[in-house]
Image: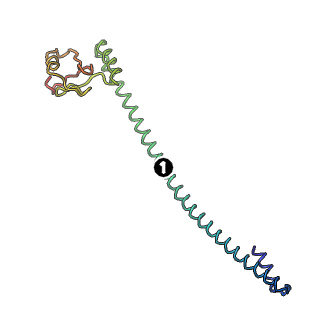
Amino acid sequence: MRQRAARDQKRLDSGAVTSPKDLENLQHEIASLAKRQSDLEDVVLEVMERREAAQERVTELTGRVQSLQDRIGDTTARRDAAAGEIDAEVATVTKERGVIAGTIPADLLKLYDKLREQQGGVGAARLYQRRCDGCRQELAITELNEVRAAAPDAVVRCENCRRILVRMPESGL
């Protein structure tokens, strides 16, 4: 466009065009080309500004992505460390359970395991202040009297949830 406008201006300045109508047309074309060039330059500037804004946004988002990836890495490392600790604790508790399970009569252990499976992993519950810690229900006075009357080594169960009740010395039962 610049070349065309320069060529037309050169023709105009050279005096080669003598017809007033051709001169007027040539001047009009030069003015149109100048306006078109100005419009295109405005478009280019706008595109450059939008590109710059987009580039800044890309830089910002790239930084945020990197920050999130760092946080994910940290969180994953903490999760893995916690899982390792849990696995170690599970191994220790499983070993301790094996030792303790060897001292419990087989029929009681079988009942406990059956109740554990039925009750979502908890086969025995503490009896504390007249309440079963398994189902959180308060035992009726007749049930409490039966628990009090039972021998210390007798297996007593909650009437509500059927878990084995563990009588604690501080509960007074």
From this view, report whether residue 106 is shown above or below residue 134. Answer: above
Q: Could you tell me which quadrant the N terminus lies in?
A: bottom right
From this view, report whether residue 67 is shown above or below residue 75. Answer: below
| In-image side of 64 versus 11 (left or right) | left
Residue 156 is situated, as x and y percent measured from the top left of the image, at 22, 17
Residue 27 is situated, as x and y percent measured from the top left of the image, at 76, 82
Residue assigned mark 1 = 70
Residue drawn at x 39%, y 32% is: 88
| In-image side of 55 versus 2 (left or right) | left
Q: Depth check: 150 or 26 in front?
A: 26
| In-image side of 10 versus 142 (left or right) | right
How many discs mark residues in the rendered view?
1
Residue 8 is situated, as x and y percent measured from the top left of the image, at 80, 79
Direction top: furthest residue: 107
Residue drawn at x 63%, y 70% is: 45
Q: Depth check: 27 or 21 in front?
A: 21
Residue drawn at x 17%, y 17% is: 152
Q: Could you tell me which quadrant the C terminus lies in?
A: top left
Mark 1: which secondary structure?
helix
| In-image side of 14 versus 128 (left or right) | right
Quarter where residue 104 is shown: top left
Look at label 1 and name its amino acid: Asp
State the colouring used for the structure image.
Answer: rainbow
Q: Depth check: 105 or 150 in front?
A: 150
Residue drawn at x 43%, y 40% is: 79
Direction front: furthest residue: 21
Residue 157 is situated, as x and y percent measured from the top left of the image, at 23, 18
